[in-house]
Amino acid sequence: MSVRAFRGEILSVPHDPLTRPDAVRHEPDGLLVVEDGVIVARGPYGDLAPRYADVPVETLPGLIVPGFIDAHVHYPQMDRIASHGEQLLDWLDRHIFPAEKAFADRAHADAVAGLFLDELLRNGTTSALVFPTVHAASVDALFEAALARNMRIISGKVLMDLGPEGLADTPDSARAESEALIARWRGKGRLGYAVTPRFALTSSDAQLQVAGRLLADHPDVLLHTHLAENERECAEVAARFPDAADYLDAYDRFGLVGARSVFAHGVHLSDRACTRMHDSGAGIAVCPTSNLFLGSGFFDFGQAARHGLTLGLGTDVGAGTSFSMLHTAGVAYQAGLMRGHRLDPFRALYLATAGSAALLHIGDRVGGLMPGQEADFVVLDCAATPLLARRTAGADLVERLFALQILGDDRAIADTYIMGERTGRT
Ligand code: GUN
Ligand code: ZN
């Protein structure tokens, strides 16, 4: 049994500040006691230190916050980040589908999966819901790399029988390969599985039905897909599903809308869809840098708040322009303003941590830095750049946090810890 303690300024937002006045937890001089990777105590140093007098204490300079949780990101798109010139559907055809074809090669998938997870850690991201490719081996590559790093990663083979040549599976192969992957990876390390139809336009009705069946047969898995992201996409979905009330309804008809459903984007949602989403318990991974990069629009935080939607935050790399969840939170604030909403810095931190955790159904394990949860955390350096140092000097907590979101990125991640172990980020 190993017990260790970390002393420093600790901040987490385990609950949504929109609905809970007691959402923010902050100890200016706190102690985090970790036993076998799990937090057993947290509180003011002065209160806890006498009880843990025998435990070795490491003092961490900086702001200790929960490891970030990226609620939507594509690992095979890492090398296509910053691809110029197109909106969603043309961008997929021109830049993304050719790159994803290369993941038929297991050695390529292994190499990129390792680099991708190291980049997450460099940015303070310790958990993520990840799109791989249509190839089952791309999931094996990611899960093996995640297991080696003891990261909490959720993923699942992409279903896309209407995809281009070289990336198209079939309803039958989708079912068989998904079943085999679930059987192979269930219960291993900190991994989780998500049934992952790419989006409504790349799966036949027969394959969407397969996805619904997989979900019904495996109540522990998530549903992960894209929803109402880009205007042309929405128009094509409306044309393909003329009887559906809206984009969400197209998924609903196949049993894909439920409490374990994670929809990326949701930029263009009807009030009906929001009501249905709330009633079903489904939620949205908000991806502001991606929405800006592809000209998709601005997420409507006000509409989501009115409907009480469950939200998390995603980078959506490679349409997203940064792996940094700090930067993504800062862009979420700016996107919110475009539709009249002022995202509070504590709520932005919540979305990047406990909010994403709740969305991914791992909120009992991570995201809040609370006793009973796993000790995934990062140490933020408010003086990581001369400008940050100047802007945060003498500033109060909320100002420092907002400055980190607007000015910060991977440079502000002093250290990343997985279950109490320093990852030695490079
Ligand atoms: N919709 C379907 N596939 C994708 C993708 O790879 N990225 C984004 N941003 N949207 C999608
Ligand atoms: Zn995406």
Image (cartoon, rainbow, N blue to C red):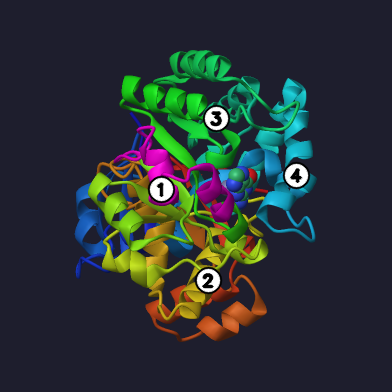
Residue under label 3, please give it: 204
Type of the residue with mark 3: Ser
Label 1 SS: helix
Type of the residue with mark 2: Gly
- Marks 3 and 2, how far apart at CA: 37 Å
Q: Quadrant of the N terminus?
A: top left
Magenta-colored stretch includes residue 254: yes
List x then y, in percent, for residue 86: 75, 58
- Marks 1 and 4, how far apart at CA: 24 Å
Magenta-colored stretch includes residue 385: no
Label 3 SS: loop
Q: Are marks 4 and 2 in contact (CB under 8 Å)?
A: no
Which badge, 3 or 2, comes first in the chain's sequence? 3
Label 4 SS: helix
Residue under label 2, please give it: 330
Q: Are marks 1 and 4 in contact (CB under 8 Å)?
A: no
Which badge, 3 or 1, comes first in the chain's sequence? 3
Residue under label 4, please give it: 93
Which badge, 4 or 2, comes first in the chain's sequence? 4
Residue under label 1, please give it: 248
Q: Is residue 73 left or right of residue 83?
A: left
Residue at image coords 22%, 66%? 19
- Marks 1 and 2, how far apart at CA: 28 Å
